[in-house]
Amino acid sequence: MSSSFGRLFVVTTFGESHGPAVGVVVDGMPPGFSVDAADIQRELDRRRPGQSALTTQRQEADRVEILAGVFEGVSLGTPIAMLVRNTDAQSKDYEALRDVFRPGHADYVYAQKYGVRDHRGGGRSSGRETVGRVAAGAVAKSALASVGVRVMGATVQVRDVKAVRRDWDEVEKNPVRAPDAQAAQAMAAAIETARAQKDSVGGVVEVVATGVPPGWGDPTMGKLDAMLGAAMLSIPATKGVEIGGGFGMCELEGSRTNDVFDGERFLTNFAGGIAGGISNGADIVVRVAVRPATSIGKAQTAATAQGGTTTIEIQGRHDPCICPRVVPVAESMMAITLMDAWLGQRALRGREK
């Protein structure tokens, strides 16, 4: 099913941008783990719209309702169902786009795929779908923490502005979610400029998992890096993934990129914590290319369902840069993937790690 991800820890999201609600069903969560609604809400608050002047001003509280699978704060081992109601959808903003295929959006391909589409805010293709991923990711993060695994992310590039430092304590102190206070200011300025010009900018989000023991992931078709690539590319607006040294290694020699292991730790981490598709005990490092937001206020040429083209200026409330809100989504997809890999290793070796 295209709305499900995972083999043992299966996450299925549902709902449309302007429907009554969005949500998720998590199947495969082992029994006896703490599931704290406050933890889930904290992650949803990081993703929700309207959290700063740099994001869409759609005002959604994104209050989570745990419908099933949890009793007295503990997982039952049965499917966990979570719901978030849409309360500030303004569908009238999209009425003029009912028969228009917006450039850069999934309007045309959804119409070709299904023969029908929800034109309100992109329907299922909207970033609103990621609410369910973040709720499921919060559950996965909590479980992974019980074995010492931590997942954290940040915006490390906006347009041509790159973060130099990796100060993870800085991330939640600025609206861009950058790990570099000085770069964060320049990133914010670039986003504000794009907004003023009724345009948008893209960037790069980096996600790091620490404490992952060696042995997670399955060669050869179920490699951990392959699963992470699929997870990240399933996030709306992502167009590229690199792990560890990534594309930068193409300019270097093997003598400079082979990670040396001294028996206790890796002295470098060009492999990004994964070798042969299996975690090697080093930090897992993934970077995701996020394209500029497709909904912009500038006049653009768009195709119509009747044939031909028209000129549109997209109204409504949109992000001039998606990166700050992609950070918690990318963290969640990392956690979901690692949770699935952990359960696979538990089944294979019969031990916690």
Image (cartoon, rainbow, N blue to C red):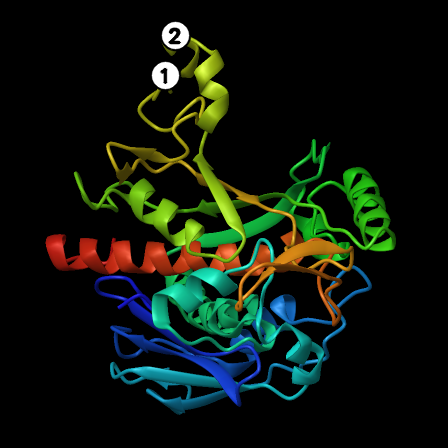
Q: Between marks 2 and 1, how big is the CA–CA gap?
A: 6 Å
Q: Quadrant of the N terminus?
A: bottom left
Kindly check if marks 2 and 1 are in contact, taking CB atoms under 8 A apart as contact. Answer: yes
What residue is shown at x 19% (from left), y 56% (from top)?
344
Left or right placement of residue 196 versus residue 300 in this view? right
**x then y, percent, for residue 229:** 38, 45
Q: Is residue 262 above or below residue 307?
A: above
Where does the image place residue 301, in percent across and percent down from the top left?
Answer: 67, 54
Quick check: 321 above or below 163?
Answer: below
The numbered mark at residue 323 is none
Asked which secondary structure carries label 1, the reply is loop
On the question of residue 103 being in view, the answer is yes
The foreground one among 343 and 324 is 324
Q: In the figure, is residue 11 to the left or right of 98?
A: left
Residue 69 place in picture, x, y as percent: 32, 87
- Left or right relative to 191: residue 80: left
The residue positioned 50% from the left and 55% from the top of the image is 330
* Image location (x, y in percent) of residue 210: 45, 45
**Which residue is located at x 66 percent, y 76 percent?**
94
From the image, tell me which residue sits under label 2.
255
Location of residue 184 by image quarter: top right
State left or right for residue 119 relative to residue 217.
right
Asked whether residue 89 is in view, the answer is no
Seen at 25% across and 53% down, the residue is 353
Q: Is residue 337 above or below residue 16?
A: above
In the rendered view, tell whether residue 114 sits above or below residue 204: below
Q: Secondary structure at mark 2?
A: helix
Indicate the amino acid at tag 1. Asn
Query: Which residue position holds label 1?
Result: 258
Q: Residues within 10 Å of mark 1 (few under 14, many from 20)?
A: few
Q: Amino acid at mark 2?
A: Ser
Query: How many numbered marks have been drawn onto this rendered protein structure?
Result: 2
